[in-house]
Image (cartoon, rainbow, N blue to C red):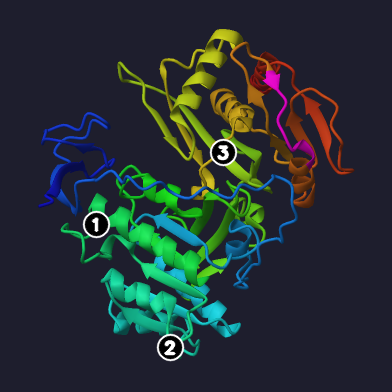
Amino acid sequence: MARTLQNFICQSCGAVSGKWAGKCEACGAWNSISEESSGGIAPVLESKRGRRIRLLPLTGEEPEAPRIQSGIGEFDRVCGGGIVPGSALLVGGDPGIGKSTLLLQIVAALARRGCRTVYISGEESVAQIRMRAKRMELSEAPVELGVETRLGNILATIEGGGEAKAPAVIIIDSIQTVMADAIDAAPGTVTQLRASTQELVRAAKRSGCAVIMVGHVTKDGQIAGPRVIEHMVDTVLYFEGDRGHQFRILRGVKNRFGPTDEIGVFEMTGMGLQQVENPSALFLAGRKEHVSGSAVFAGIEGTRPVLVEIQALVAPSSLGTPRRAVVGWDSGRLAMVLAVLDARCGLTLGASDVYLNVAGGLRISEPAADLAVAAALVSSYTGVPVRASSVVFGEISLSGEIRPVTQTEARLKEAAKLGFTRAMTPAGIIPLPAAISLDEIPLLARLVEDFQEQAESRNG
């Protein structure tokens, strides 16, 4: 008689071990290992040989994947031009950030365009969803609602059958609540998540229905469950934002049908999420000119140039270990810029508290922000404001040189469109928009000297 397998699985990373332990050897998490039944039997080697795979050449003409456009331009942009039929999308984000609100608006927009859309919730009742739709004036949209957590019933809805037509798009809110009856494990565990996601993806490929799953995130900002879930789906989107700001960022981190690192910008209002077609103007709204410690960075998010304000404050510290607080940027990158300013430019910032903030709740990861951060820090240290009509971008090396960055022309065009007339950039030959004049900075020390000379002339 075949025996049921009992495994000990880490609920943080999905590592499987043969015995229980207090600490997971794979990810180092404590008290995360629990015993689960795999729901299967011991593997048996098959003596029968399989059939040969039909091999095809690399060359060939394949039609481009069709798209289902929702009409919400920011969402379609992040997806690569629209939703691909038969694809599986995973949307993650902090609790209360607006994931359910965004997806309800998407299915309502699709339903108004004639697509059959289904919204299945495992966390809310139909009455709660209707209340939210009424508040956002979406009640008239022909969206079909359902409350279900059993995987078998959801699969039957996706594949249709009989006279029932399979939906074009279905929302699963959320994947952590879905439970497969064949698996003896609680909903949300690694085993349930892996099996449920695999079956949903398989059903999407068979039926041609696009499945959009909502995933909870951990305290570290990662989608809960094993990373294998993100590998199974075609597209992974993160919904980011600070609750203290009205801006929300939909960021694509994986997309088999389009570019990655694309972003869509939304504004949270009483009527739901409104798309922002010109995020640079929104991020710079309310910026005060002629204030020290502020610099405008011309960045690239995916294929879109975005201008954002970087704020810095350098203050004397009374502590033995000065504070370093960073919001919206890499703290390790800030430490590197401070070390270069100290070693290559002679600024003594090691005994000062340093605070850095990216205005608007946007998170920046590209190295091109180094020069803008350095300009904001030096401006705060010397008390000399960066010119209000200037944008700054460039990568700083450990030798104090300013390295060129990609897509310079797109950054300058976006700056010129918003009325900026000067740009502090790395040295090099750059195609210029007519309204932009360049300040080439080959060395970071030159930037620091300019600020210090302005500070001395003011004091003198």
Judged by depth in the image, the label closer to the viewer, 2 or 3, is: 2
Mark 1, residue position: 188
CB under 8 Å between discs 3 and 1? no
Residue 336, image x and y in percent?
51, 19
Judged by depth in the image, the label closer to the viewer, 3 or 1, is: 1
User: Residue 291 lies in what quarter of the image?
Assistant: top right
Residue 343, image x and y in percent?
55, 8
| Quarter containing the C terminus | top right
First of labels 2, 3 by sequence position:
2
Judged by depth in the image, the label closer to the viewer, 1 or 2, is: 2
Callout 3: helix, strand or loop? Answer: strand
Callout 1: helix, strand or loop? Answer: loop
Mark 2, residue position: 162
Report if residue 269 is visible in the image.
no
Label total for image: 3
Report how far apart the C-alphas of labels 2 and 3 lie in the structure. Answer: 58 Å
Amino acid type assigned to the residue bearing label 2 in the image: Gly
CB under 8 Å between discs 2 and 3? no
Report how far apart the C-alphas of labels 1 and 2 lie in the structure. Answer: 32 Å
Mark 3, residue position: 310
Amino acid type assigned to the residue bearing label 3 in the image: Ile
First of labels 1, 2 by sequence position:
2
Q: Residue 85 carries which label?
A: none
Magenta range: 402-409
Callout 2: helix, strand or loop? Answer: loop
Q: Is residue 188 magenta?
A: no
Amino acid type assigned to the residue bearing label 1 in the image: Gly
